[in-house]
Image (tube, rainbow, N blue to C red):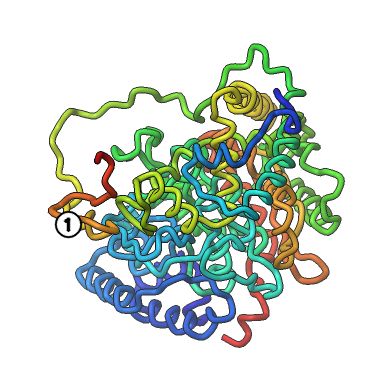
Amino acid sequence: MDALHAFTVGEAARHVREGTVTSVQLAEALLARIAKLDPTVGAYLSVDRDDVLRQARAADARRAKGETAPLLGVPIGVKDVLNVKGQPCTCGSQILAGYRAPYDATAIQRLREAGAVILGRLNMDEFAMGSSTENSSWQPTRNPWDTARVPGGSSGGSAAAVAADLALATLGTDTGGSIRQPAALCGCVGLKPTYGRISRYGLVAYASSLDQIGPLTKDVRDAALLLNAMAGPDPMDSTTLKAPPVDFTAALGRDLRGLKLGLPREYFIDGMDPEVERAVRDAVRQCEQLGATVVPVELPQTKYAIATYYIVATAEASANLARFDGVRYGLRVAGDDPIELYERTRAKGFGPEVKRRIILGTYVLSSGYYDAYYLRAQKVRSWIRAGFDEAFRRCDALLTPTSPTPAFRFGERTDDPLQMYLSDIFTVTVNLAGICGISVPCGFTGAGLPVGLQVIGPALGEETILRVAHAYEQSTDWHKRRPPLNNNG
Amino acid sequence: MPDAASSGFDVAYVARLARLELADEERARLQGQLEQILAYVDELKNVDVSGLPPMAQAIEACNVLRADEVKPGLPHDDVMANAPEHRMGQFVVPRIIE
């Protein structure tokens, strides 16, 4: 038997079901590994050891009574932006220091119903704004493949924890690439479901029309298992889709014959890392060998995606983050009147990137500039959506790089916000269109850094992208490689 | 679309709208960075948007209603436990009216 921390979710669930491993054993193995390795990685902001073991004992008791929930006893880590009752939820921000969630997010509640044990809270860019996790107010998270480099972001803690076997799987959130980009940079699988697939109730909002919760996992089957547990309509989120429940693992295990995969030429740009391009083009050829037909497609809207995203997302953020004013929760800095109290609280509580985006978002919504910026961006957004609709009339899914570069060094892009924003150039379009995408490992650079292949599908096209990602993954062994860090574990 | 240089982007004014106090050096840095970002997003003026409907969200749903039934909310004490200052079940704020 492999070391317990090396299990996939599927393997761990099977062992618990068959009685060969207990949930307490899984929890203890992960807690021990976190204690040993997380001082180096920095993935977790908090781990409530007693609570984890209490949940694991309860899972073992459910098992002893004959229950067979699909994730029974499996420990899963959670990005610090999702409410877990009784636990901190800082969103990586000082403004929520000391906050304790009074309720479970729907995604968390559904994982519990499926039997999962909720492990610790994972580091992130403050309020999910960033692509390197360097915007966390608390600590850096290091890429397990090279600790001098960032894990990507904003779900950097979630990706690093999976890569370093500090969780069997984790939850992240993706507003412009925040699940897929760190998954690519850390060599794990990251799924951004269709907008509305998973309830956002209990997710602290960044940009409400773009945000979506999703899993980061060691393989594609695990992503399908977690999606099974979390997907579905929720009366607490009126934007959830009424799609009937499906078993997302049912589409796995088939080859790619009969599938048409589109290759958008705008996603292979000047200035992208040549090793990334080579790995992705090799993966495309591999998909052809698995039976897919690859066709060229055009998405001329792509060059406007980052500009559109930074108007739409910051506008929504400026409204969403207005609630952090020192009155009902979180930090308060005293002032002589309420306005001064708000201004001082927000000045002290928010970090530089959050301030930058609040100001940009406030400006593009302000009187005299709304039509020129926000309304225009909303119109370009519908053109971006139309471009995907057109592409999906000619193919079943798209193949692209997830990120134009592998993991970069700490500090490399922090002085140039625009350069950092361009990290998301291949992922933001999916959020703007409200469709789905998955990143799956597709190779390594000469320096040993992981590269991700992105498979993009239409709205509610998760079964197709999971099938493509799974067929590709199973024909390679990229997903089985582990960072050198793990040799000490 | 106004271009950034002539748009009269004034970080101090926008920060007041956003209820955000900025230190002097912070204000200077943000003014420069945001002018650069606004110059970049100006590329959207190259798109012919005539005839394109504005897209506010990715789904078709509108006016999603539920039955008008009384349901339990969060326990009052649990919510108040996160308040920076509260008294008699109320949030305390500085005096607004003399």
Q: Residue drawn 61% across and 81% down?
A: A486
Q: Which residue is mark 1?
A: B77
A232 left or right of B38 in image: left
Disc 1 residue type (three-letter): Asp
B91 left or right of B10 in image: left
Q: Position of residue A71 (x, y in %)?
A: 37, 62
Q: Residue drawn 35% across and 33% down?
A: A238
Dot 1 lies on which element? Answer: helix
Relative to A326, does residue A13 appear above or below in the rendering? below
Q: Residue drawn 71% across and 40% down?
A: B35
Q: Give the crowd class for mark 1: few <14, some 14-19, many >=20 residues within 10 Å.
A: few
In the rendered structure, the residue with mark 1 lies on which chain? B
Tell me, yes or no, if residue A464 can be seen here. Answer: no
Q: Position of residue A365 (x, y in %)?
A: 54, 30
Quarter of the rendering containing residue A368: top right
| Quadrant of the rendering where the C terminus of chain A is positioned | bottom right
A10 left or right of B77 in image: right
